[in-house]
Image (cartoon, rainbow, N blue to C red):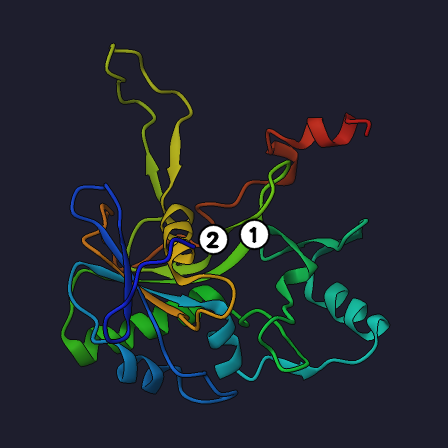
């Protein structure tokens, strides 16, 4: 994370995307089964033309998606139960959950006080419910929510952010059928808007002791909408461009 001295409870990083700005919000520690809505009201006042980013961990905590850490066998059984596909590997379980490739079904032990924190039950539903609450209370129109988690990329070190669920804006920007600067027609190019914004926010929020589970993206370059297609970013494993590589690679 890029460290910038903060004033009051805000740390910010400015991104060169028109006037877009990302600000991570330092908060108190979120408690298990407390209200996510009260927590938001306590720490931020949502505004129009912005996206509120929330780490999946506090959404899961609010839902009580926590269990005591037992044996490795117990954890492995939970991972398999939470996944539609689970493959043990050298370092972790490689799993598919809700159409996304992730490690260990997203189950997290960091900052969990010896417990296991699972992912929210339905991140898209949670994002829509939080958006509805904020729109009604703060009288908003163009407003979005992203619920984030962290992910590894194949053949790359480190983690980036990803959007487990989002609401209020289109998750994909489609360039197909348009022309590039030399008049060539784009045939397959699409931009993953939701995960790109999630990565920017997670970078600012941090992954360690920063205690910044919320962030606000102001003036994002997105297409606002009332209803999102939660399958817009999902690719069938049989159609994934990397599938042949990992099927035939020899290490």
Q: Left or right: 104 with respect to 192?
A: right
- Judged from the image, the secondary structure of the residue bearing numbered disc 2 is strand
Q: Residue 189 appears in which quarter of the rendering?
A: top left
Give the residue drawn at x 83%, y 71%.
72
Taking depth in this image into account, of 243 and 9 the one nearest to the observer is 9
Is label 2 in contact with label 1 (beta carbons under 8 Å)? yes
Q: Is residue 43 above or below residue 131?
A: below
- Quadrant containing the N terminus is bottom left
Q: Name the residue at 58% across, 52% down.
A: 99
Q: Tag on residue 80?
A: none
Location of mark 2 (residue): 161
Q: Is residue 155 left or right of residue 220?
A: right
Q: Quadrant of residue 22?
A: bottom left
Instruction: Indicate the position of residue 129 as horizontal and vertical percent values.
Output: 35, 74
Seen at 52% across and 80% down, the residue is 61
- Is 69 drawn above or below residue 79 in the view shown? below
Tell me residue 128's x, y (percent).
35, 68
Q: Which quadrant does the C terminus fall into? A: top right
242 in relation to 90, above or below:
above
Closer to the chain start, of discs 2 and 1, is 1
Apparent side of residue 147 relative to residue 244 in the rendered image (left or right): left
Question: Please, which residue is most extreme toward the front here?
Answer: 5
Q: Element at badge 1?
A: strand
Judging depth in this view, the residue of 126 and 102 nearest the camera is 102
Total numbered circles: 2
User: Distance from label 2 to label 1 (Cα)?
Assistant: 6 Å
Label 1 sits on residue: 151
Dot 1 crowding, Cα within 10 Å, few <14, some 14–19, many 20+: some
10 Å crowding of disc 2: few (<14), some (14-19), many (20+): many
Residue 19 position within the rendered picture, expressed as x and y whole percent measured from the top left: 16, 47
Residue 209 location (% of width, % of height): 49, 70
| Identity of the residue drawn at 23% across and 41% down | 16
């Amino acid at each position: 994370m890029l460290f910038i001295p903060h004033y009051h409870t805000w740390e910010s990083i400015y991104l060169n995307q028109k006037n877009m700005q990302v600000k991570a919000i330092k908060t108190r520690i979120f408690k298990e089964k407390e209200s996510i809505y009260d927590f938001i009201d306590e720490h931020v006042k949502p505004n129009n033309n912005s996206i509120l980013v929330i780490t999946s961990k506090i959404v899961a905590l609010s839902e009580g998606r926590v269990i005591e850490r037992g044996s490795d066998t117990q954890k492995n059984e939970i991972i398999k139960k939470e996944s539609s596909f689970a493959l043990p590997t050298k370092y972790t379980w490689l799993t598919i959950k809700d159409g996304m490739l992730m490690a260990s079904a997203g189950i997290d032990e960091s900052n969990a006080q010896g417990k296991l924190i699972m992912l929210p039950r339905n991140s898209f539903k949670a994002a829509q419910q939080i958006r509805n609450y904020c729109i009604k209370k703060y009288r908003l129109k163009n407003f979005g929510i992203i619920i984030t988690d962290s992910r590894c990329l194949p053949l790359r070190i480190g983690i980036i952010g990803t959007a487990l669920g989002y609401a209020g804006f289109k998750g994909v920007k489609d360039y197909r059928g348009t022309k590039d600067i030399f008049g060539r027609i784009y045939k397959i190019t699409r931009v993953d808007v939701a995960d790109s914004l999630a990565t920017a926010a997670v970078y600012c929020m941090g992954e360690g002791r920063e205690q910044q589970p919320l962030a606000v993206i102001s003036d994002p370059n997105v297409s606002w909408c009332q209803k999102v297609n939660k399958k817009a970013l999902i690719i069938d494993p049989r159609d994934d461009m990397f599938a042949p590589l990992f099927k035939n690679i020899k290490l």
